Image (tube, grey):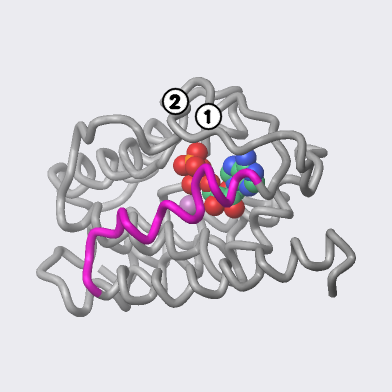
Amino acid sequence: MQAIIDATESFVKQALTGAEGGHDWWHIYRVWQQARHIAAKEQVDMLVVELAALLHDIADSKFHNGDELVGPAKAAAFLQTQPVPQHVTDHVVNIVKHISFKGGNNAREFYSPELGVVQDADRLDALGAVGIARAFNYGGFKNRALYDPAIAPQLNMTKEEYKHSAAPTINHFYEKLLLLKDRMNTATGKALAEERHAFMEAYLQQFYREWNGES
Ligand code: ADP
Ligand code: NI
């Protein structure tokens, strides 16, 4: 099992060479470690959790013209090269397919405790100090404004609207990041999310004070 994990780690590192700083190998590394931490308190198949954490952003649709099939297909093709039982491959590919937020207004088509763990770990990496860094890095990558008081956040976006939004990065806090703490799957994930959420609330207060010349 360790040989499979090692091979997957090498494959993912290689595939993400040159990736945007918020979706690079180090994002995968953090999600992988956090998923292992959360999984320790859950009844889950650790091989599925580790492989899904490692492969979950192998080809994010944001960086593939919105195509959501590339990631699951790449994950499946890689796993076929490894001595992994077919049911494990199928489970991991299902997690890769269904882990994303995309506005958060879509019904769940697939759920398993293993998906719950990896999704919590991925969501935690969108929160707190690292989450803030990732959001502004992505905004910079897309040449977005930091903040524009004239452009209000849009809740209730459809999946397509969410994918095509070009709003300032501060809006993303209201459209996604601050909603995550109420969508965690595990008790461990929820507790960590509350802590990171509070840090982001404090950050936003300070941001507005500075913006308005009050600090
Ligand atoms: P999705 O929300 O489509 O599932 P991800 O979960 O891959 O996308 O998003 C991961 C991270 O990418 C977010 O937590 C955030 O840091 C960054 N990101 C995605 N969309 C935006 C955006 N519109 N503005 C700023 N950051 C974003
Ligand atoms: Ni991710």
Tell me where the magenta segment starts and ends, as one range.
171-187
- The picture places residue 145, in percent across and down from the top left corner, at 81, 42
The amino acid type of the residue labelled 2 equals Lys
- The picture places residue 207, in percent across and down from the top left corner, at 75, 64
Residue 178 vs residue 127, the one in the foreground: 178
The amino acid type of the residue labelled 1 equals Tyr
Q: In this view, does 190 lie above or below 174?
A: below
User: Around disc 1, counting alpha carbons within 10 Å, would you say few (fewer than 14), some (14 to 19), or many (20 or more)?
Assistant: many
Q: Can residue 15 be seen in this view?
A: no
Q: Is residue 84 visible?
A: yes
Badge number at residue 104: none
Q: Is mark 2 on a helix, strand or loop?
A: helix
Residue bearing the label numbered 1: 162
Q: What's the CA distance linking mark 1 and mark 2?
A: 5 Å
Which residue: 55% across, 33% down?
A: 154
Disc 1 vs disc 2: Cβ atoms closer than 8 Å? yes
Q: In this view, does 105 lie above or below 172?
A: above
Queried whether the magenta region covers residue 174, the answer comes back as yes
Q: Could you tell me which quadrant the C terminus lies in?
A: bottom right
Spot the residue most to the left. Answer: 43
Q: Could you tell me which quadrant the N terminus lies in?
A: bottom left
In this picture, residue 153 sits left or right of residue 72: right
In this picture, residue 203 sits left or right of residue 80: right
Residue bearing the label numbered 2: 159
Q: Is mark 1 within 8 Å of ligand 1?
A: yes
Q: Main secondary structure of the magenta part?
A: helix
Spot the residue most to the right. Answer: 213
Which residue: 62% across, 28% down?
A: 165
- The picture places residue 110, in percent across and down from the top left corner, at 19, 37
